[in-house]
Amino acid sequence: MVKKEKGKVGSSFQENIEYMNQVLPVGESFDVLRRDIIIGGRQASFYFINGFMKDETMQKIMASFLGVKDREMPKDATSFSQKYISYDSVDIISNFDQVIKNVLSGITCLFIEGYEVCIAIDCRTYPARSVEEPEKDKSLHGSRDGFVETIVCNTAMIRRRIRDPHLIMEMVEAGNTTRTDIAICYMSDRVDEELLKNIESRINQLQIDDLRMNQQTLAEEMFKRKWFNPFPKFKFTERPDTAVACLLEGKVVILVDNSPSAMILPTSILDMIEEANDYYFPTVTGVYLKFTRVLITILTMFLTPTFMLFMQNPGWLPDIFSFVAVKDTINIPLIFQFLILELSIDGLRLAALNTPSMLSTPLSVIAGLVMGEFSVQSGWFNAEVMLYMAFVAVANYTQPNFELGYALKFMRLLLLILTACLNLPGFIIGCILILCFLAFNKTLSGRNYLNVKLR
């Protein structure tokens, strides 16, 4: 095996090619290609990935080199790239580790006999889907574009909206195997320097083999969460306008290649509940929408436990609210009715994810009729329980953060079980625990959900 001292490109063209052939699966993997040509009477070899390089582009590059005469060949690679390579992004690389990374990233690497370096020509084209509005985070007004899986396209959508030299986008990588590109975006004149240094330090110190789940793996490795606290520590968005608004507020946005969403830091409970419509409407309307979302979020967590508490203590109900009491026979204890329905709703949600779109609507209607009508008539559930769980199931969709929705669900289950077991003391203990989960949920920025600095 050819050994290269300190991984540097050598003066021997043959040794360089042998080393590249040993490291790269040329001939074994159909998409890793090597193309040999003669440039100015010298041997030359291209290394590139089939799929990142269009045939027309490769033909234009080779055609421009075939016309070079022997006497016209420059003495060094820098002069050659300046004179004969018309592409804007050209780099001279002397380290084999960087050469291998560039080839596997889709960049065309050229070795020429007599040059002790490699010429990297960035003329790659990544396969990408069209830019469209995210399904989960829609707005009635504003732009209709959304992030895609290509990081360069995502940074371009941000740069299009902020034409300011203070917008900085640092490119780093993580994962010894995947070597995934990560862009740290911030406004240099508005960002919290301490937070920025903390984020950069954590990413640079990552000791991880791969980012198999892209952004989620990065989030887990950057900040080890406590398993018993389900509240999310990061805010994600697929909308470029939301990411830009956060940048202008002095926050840091992290983009990961192959992920169509942006990670926003720092965050709080109010940031999690916000959505784009809050800003595209007039101030009064936006405040009303935000207040409504907060109120409904609180109701989804406390409605069913409070109903359980009053059903265990019917004498506490004021006469004006006596109509909410369960009138029919209770065949199954209320706590088990609530728990069964919580699991059933998640089961229906999972079934909807795996149901073909053309069948999802009729199957949802059938499931709703069966669970809503016949489950009450059969005596499994009481009508009041079905009503309140239906409200909770629908109200969960009023806030855009999926992970926060499940965190609220777990808090609701905790409060339900404690109330059923301990009555009023259990309800009070559950409320205190929920407040503690919020107050002590420390995030990467050193601040908790209540935006109080934790030392």
Image (cartoon, rainbow, N blue to C red):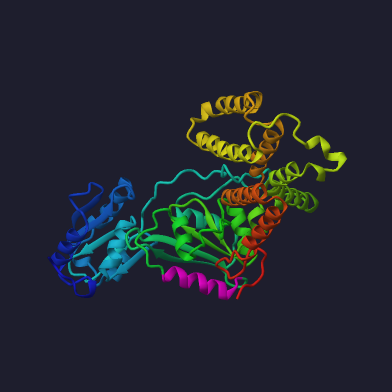
- Asked whether 291 or 24 is in front, the reply is 291
Q: Total number of numbered labels?
A: 0
* Residue for point 56% across, 57% down: 232
State whether residue 94 is above or below residue 138: below
Percent x, y for residue 318?
Answer: 85, 43
Q: Quadrant of the N terminus?
A: bottom left
- Quadrant of the image occupied by residue 333: top right
Q: Quadrant of the C terminus?
A: bottom right
Q: Is residue 64 visible?
A: yes
**Side of 258 relative to 286 (left or right):** left
Main secondary structure along the magenta-highlighted residues? helix
* Residue for point 33% across, 57% down: 107
Q: Is residue 39 visible?
A: no
- Asked whether 64 or 279 is in front, the reply is 279
State whether residue 318 is above or below residue 94: above
Percent x, y for residue 395?
Answer: 67, 42
- Asked whether 366 or 56 is in front, the reply is 366
**Side of 63 relative to 426 (left or right):** left
Residue 181 covered by magenta stretch: no
- Quadrant of the image occupied by residue 165: bottom right
**Side of 25 relative to 280 (left or right):** left
Percent x, y for residue 56?
Answer: 32, 46
- Quadrant of the image occupied by residue 98: bottom left
**Side of 85 relative to 1 (left or right):** right
Residue range in magenta is 191-205
* Residue for point 64% across, 63% down: 436
Residue 198 covered by magenta stretch: yes
State whether residue 35 is above or below residue 190: above
Question: Residue reaching furthest right?
Answer: 320
Percent x, y for residue 175?
Answer: 37, 62
* Residue for point 63% across, 55% down: 272
